[in-house]
Image (cartoon, rainbow, N blue to C red):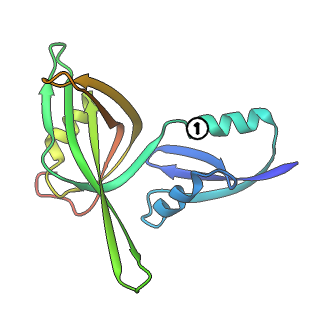
C-alpha cells in the first residue's frame, strides 16, 4: 500500500505528514499566511515505522500566529537564565448563518527561556505580530487560599517577528 506525504516548512524546520492526519487542517490554514506551505509531494510505501515517524514529528507541537497583548514580563533566574512571559491573541473570522462577520479571539499564555526570552525582551512590544512554535506545558500550583490552580502555557522554542520592521530592529 502507498500513501501520499506532504512536506511543510516553518522557519528552518520541515514537517512531513500524510493527508489522513487530523492536524493537517491547521497546517493548511497556516499556509494561507505563507509560514507553512506545501513544498513537495512524495508517494512512499507505508508501514508501521513510517507512520510512527510521522506521528512523532507532530507530537506536542504548537504553532501560533497572533498579536502580543502587552510587553513581555522578563525575570532573570538565580542561574542567570532569563524567563519571559507574555500573552498572544489569535483571531478567527467567519460568517454566521445570518451572513454577519464574526471574529473570535483566543488568548494564549506563552513562556520563553534563554536566548528566546532575550529576543522577546529586546524586540517584542504590545500589538506586535509574531509567529511562535513550541509545546504545551501543563502545571498546577496552590493559591494563597489553598485552592489548586491549573495553567496551560505554550513554551516557545522558535520565535518569528512578523509585520513591518521597527526603527530599533
Q: Residue furthest right?
A: 1
Q: Residue 4 appears at what percent x and percent y? A: 75, 54
Question: Quarter of the image holding residue 93?
Answer: bottom left
Q: Residue 151 appears at what percent x and percent y? A: 30, 34
**Depth order, front residue of 139/166:** 139
Taking the image as shown, residue 73 lies to the left or right of residue 57, namely left
Q: Residue furthest bottom?
A: 99
Taking the image as shown, residue 65 lies to the left or right of residue 84, namely right
Image point (35%, 83%), residue name: 100
Question: Quarter of the image holding residue 137?
Answer: top left
Taking the image as shown, residue 163 lies to the left or right of residue 20, namely left
**Depth order, front residue of 24/132:** 24
Q: Secondary structure at mark 1?
A: helix
Q: Which residue is mark 1?
A: 57
Q: Residue furthest top?
A: 79
User: What number of labels is visible?
Assistant: 1
Q: In the displayed structure, would residue 45 be above or below residue 137?
A: below
Taking the image as shown, residue 113 lies to the left or right of residue 9, namely left
Q: Residue 60 appears at what percent x and percent y? A: 49, 36
Mark 1 closeness class: few <14, some 14–19, many ≥20 residues within 10 Å: few
Image point (25%, 23%), residue name: 141
Image point (19%, 13%), residue name: 79
Question: Quarter of the image holding residue 65?
Answer: bottom left
Q: In the displayed structure, would residue 98 be above or below residue 59?
A: below
Image point (52%, 51%), residue name: 9
Q: Residue 92 appears at what percent x and percent y? A: 37, 66
Amino acid at each position: 500500500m502507498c500513501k501520499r506525504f506532504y512536506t511543510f516548512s516553518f522557519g528552518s524546520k520541515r514537517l512531513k505528514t500524510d493527508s489522513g492526519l487530523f492536524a493537517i487542517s491547521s497546517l493548511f490554514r497556516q499556509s494561507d499566511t505563507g509560514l507553512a506551505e506545501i513544498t513537495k509531494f512524495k508517494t512512499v510505501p507505508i508501514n508501521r515505522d513510517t507512520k510512527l515517524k510521522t506521528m512523532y514529528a507532530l507530537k506536542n507541537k504548537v504553532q501560533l500566529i497572533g498579536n502580543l497583548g502587552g510587553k513581555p514580563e522578563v525575570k532573570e533566574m538565580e542561574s542567570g537564565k532569563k524567563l519571559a512571559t507574555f500573552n498572544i491573541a489569535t483571531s478567527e473570522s467567519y460568517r454566521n448563518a445570518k451572513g454577519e462577520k464574526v471574529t473570535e479571539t483566543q488568548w494564549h499564555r506563552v513562556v520563553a527561556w534563554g536566548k528566546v526570552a532575550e529576543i522577546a525582551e529586546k524586540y517584542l512590544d504590545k500589538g506586535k505580530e509574531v509567529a511562535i512554535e513550541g509545546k504545551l506545558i501543563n502545571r498546577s500550583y496552590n493559591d494563597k487560599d489553598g485552592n489548586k490552580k491549573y495553567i496551560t502555557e505554550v513554551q516557545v522554542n522558535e520565535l518569528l517577528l512578523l509585520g513591518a520592521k521597527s526603527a530599533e530592529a
